[in-house]
C-alpha cells in the first residue's frame, strides 16, 4: 500500500523535469583520437569498409575530435549550428575512412563544439595537421608486438611539445586500438584530465601490419 501511495503522489505531482542538456561550446579541451586502422579492420570489418580494402594501406585514421570537461564529456548536444552537408561528410573519408563515421562523430561530439558542421570538420583537419605520426608507423610492413609505452614514446619523440600525461594508448583484445592526444581549445598540446589519461594496462600489444 505504501508503494501505491508513493506512486500516486508522484503521478499527481506532474511529470519529472527533463534531464539537463549539455551546452554547445561549453567544454574545457579536446581529445583527438587516432585509430589504428588494421586493428579495427581485423576486429570489425565485414568486408564492406573502404578503409579495409586491400591496397588502401591505412595506418592511423581519425576516430574523432571530442570536446571534454575536466571530468567527463558532453555528447549529443542540441545545437542550432548548421549540419555538414552529405558532401562535406564524404570529403572527410580521406581522414576518417568513411563519410559515415564523420557524420556520426559530428552528431555525437561535433554538435557540442559550438561550431557549424563544416567548421568542425575544418578544425579536425587542423588538429591532425599539428600531430606528427612516427615514421615507423606510417607504413608498417609487418605485424609487431610492442609495449604501449613504446608507442607513446615514439609519438613524444616526434611531437616535442607533448607530455606523457597528454598522450594515451588504448587497446582491445590485446591489440593497439587508439592513440588519444589531448589538446587545448586552440589545439595546443596539454595534459589529459585524469579520466582521459588511463593507458592500456597490457605489457605488450599486437600491432597488425598496414596492408
Image (tube, helix red, strand yellow):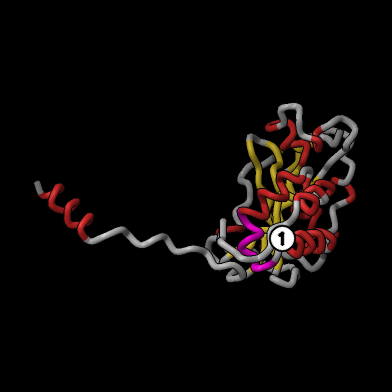
Mark 1 falls on what kind of element?
helix
Q: Is residue 24 visible?
A: yes
Q: Which residue is mark 1?
A: 117
Report which quarter residue 42 is drawn in: top right
Q: Is residue 94 above or below residue 160?
A: above
Looking at the image, residue 166 sits to the left or right of residue 73; the answer is: right
Q: Residue at x 74, y 72 (%)?
A: 186
Q: Is residue 179 visible?
A: no
Residue at the far top in the pictured view? 47
Residue 104: image location, x then y, percent: 66, 48
Residue 76: image location, x then y, percent: 56, 56
Residue 100: image location, x then y, percent: 72, 44
Query: Range of the magenta residues?
Result: 108-115
Q: Residue at x 71, y 60 (%)?
A: 117
Q: Residue at x 70, y 70 (%)?
A: 184
Split into 4 quadrants, where in the image is the C terminus? top right
Amino acid at each position: 500500500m505504501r508503494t501505491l501511495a508513493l506512486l500516486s503522489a508522484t503521478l499527481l505531482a506532474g511529470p519529472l523535469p527533463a534531464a539537463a542538456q549539455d551546452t554547445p561550446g561549453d567544454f574545457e579541451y579536446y581529445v583527438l583520437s587516432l585509430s589504428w586502422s588494421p586493428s579495427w579492420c581485423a576486429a570489425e570489418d565485414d568486408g564492406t569498409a573502404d578503409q579495409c580494402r586491400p591496397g588502401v594501406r591505412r595506418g592511423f585514421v581519425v576516430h574523432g575530435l571530442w570536446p571534454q570537461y575536466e571530468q567527463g564529456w558532453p555528447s549529443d548536444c542540441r545545437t542550432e549550428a548548421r549540419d555538414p552537408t552529405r558532401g562535406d561528410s564524404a570529403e572527410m573519408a580521406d581522414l576518417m575512412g568513411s563519410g559515415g563515421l564523420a557524420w556520426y562523430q559530428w552528431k555525437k561530439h561535433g554538435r557540442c563544439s559550438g561550431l557549424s558542421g563544416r567548421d568542425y570538420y575544418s578544425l579536425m583537419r587542423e588538429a591532425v595537421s599539428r600531430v606528427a605520426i612516427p615514421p615507423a608507423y606510417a607504413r608498417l610492413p609487418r605485424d609487431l608486438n610492442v609495449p604501449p609505452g613504446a608507442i607513446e614514446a615514439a609519438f613524444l619523440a616526434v611531437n616535442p611539445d607533448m607530455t606523457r600525461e597528454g598522450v594515451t594508448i588504448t587497446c582491445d583484445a590485446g591489440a593497439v586500438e587508439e592513440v588519444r592526444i589531448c589538446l587545448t581549445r586552440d589545439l595546443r598540446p596539454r595534459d589529459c584530465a585524469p579520466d582521459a589519461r588511463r593507458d592500456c594496462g597490457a605489457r605488450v600489444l599486437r600491432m597488425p601490419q598496414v596492408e
